Image (cartoon, helix red, strand yellow):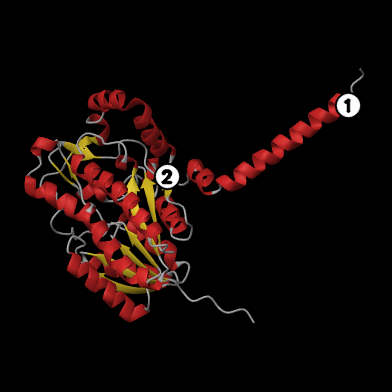
Amino acid sequence: MATQKQPEVVVITGASAGVGRAVAQRFARDGAKIALIARGRGKLESTAREVEELGGEALILPCDVSDPEAVDAAAEQAEAHFGPIDIWINVAFAGVMARFMDITPEDYKRVTEVTYLGQINGARAALKRMIPRNRGHVVLTGSALAYRGIPLQSAYCGSKHAIQGFQDSIRAELYHAKSSVHVAMVQLPGVNTPEFNWMRTNMPMKLKPASPPYQPEVAAHALHWAAHHRRKQVMVGGSTVLAIWGDRFASDLLDRYLGRTGFASQQGDEPIEPGRKDNLWEPVDEDFGAHGRFDSISRKSSVQLWANLHHATLVAGMSLLAAAGAGAYALARRKSPA
């Protein structure tokens, strides 16, 4: 009789909204045991209800990821409740949409501590437990902006660049130790999440993604896949690929182009309402779920992502087609009169 597979133990930071919430929903469909980390208890409770309804088990762990001791304590609680952590996914982040010189040093530090050090704190808590067991997957959430910075998001872009460098270093150390623990990074495009409703800004108009976004379920699929395969990097969306490769070959031109277009492309046509709250220092009470306000223009799938995840199948298929074509050509040559 086949042994029944045990449910995976998964920790997700930033699980109360957006991509993190969509990731929790995706793992819940596997029947996973999921520890949910974010600051706001109310939204975590909503996520936990969704997890339970979809077939998973949920544990709420309110925590600010910028606090390394709190993150480690959350990991300890997760293992005490569910058992050894199999997968740790870092999604939590913060952002400020403003010119660099308009961002206070305190706000800049806060973005860095949440978006960069938050992932470092999560990785440390996970690796502390996974390395002695010689198994486990850590998934870092990156962005096209980990390679190509854009105006008005210098703190966020700098943090994502830093995560990319951290991944290179820690993977090399794991290889040196001959460890089976795997660290992956998923580079996301713009995603339709509530971040544009509550990101701190001094811009006059409502914030929006610079290009048509993808639904959070597309990002969640990529993060779920990365947690079960040994790929170093997964890129999501054609816009991500274009940004990364465009920067490699035309970085200076992109600086100039984004200098002309990057301010307007990240603002809509409606002014920001008076008294708008942001979530930089405190969580916002409203529960928006996984989705933002851009459902009507958001992409529900990515051909590029499908091709990225199935490239071995595509290469094999193309090889077969090429072989079949060569065989047909050779047969036609033999049958043709001299």
State the residue lying farthest toward the top: 338
Residue beneath disc 2: 235
Residue in the foreground of this view, choosing between 191 and 113: 113
Q: Residue at x 38, y 63 (%)?
A: 24
Q: Is residue 210 above or below residue 42?
A: above
Amino acid carrying label 1: it is: Arg
State the residue lying farthest toward the right: 337
Q: For the residues marked 2 and 1, what is the alpha-carbon distance in whole angstroms?
A: 46 Å
Q: Residues within 10 Å of mark 2 (few under 14, many from 20)?
A: many
Residue in the foreground of this view, choosing between 2 and 338: 338
Left or right: where does residue 207 sit relative to residue 32? Answer: left
- Tell me, yes or no, if residue 24 can be seen here: yes
Secondary structure of the residue carrying numbered label 2:
strand
- Tell me, yes or no, if residue 49 can be seen here: no
Q: Position of residue 302 (x, y in %)?
A: 48, 43
Left or right: where does residue 228 sit relative to residue 279? Answer: right
Q: Position of residue 54 (x, y in %)?
A: 44, 69
Secondary structure of the residue carrying numbered label 1:
helix
Q: Quadrant of the C terminus?
A: top right
Q: Which mark is residue 334?
A: 1
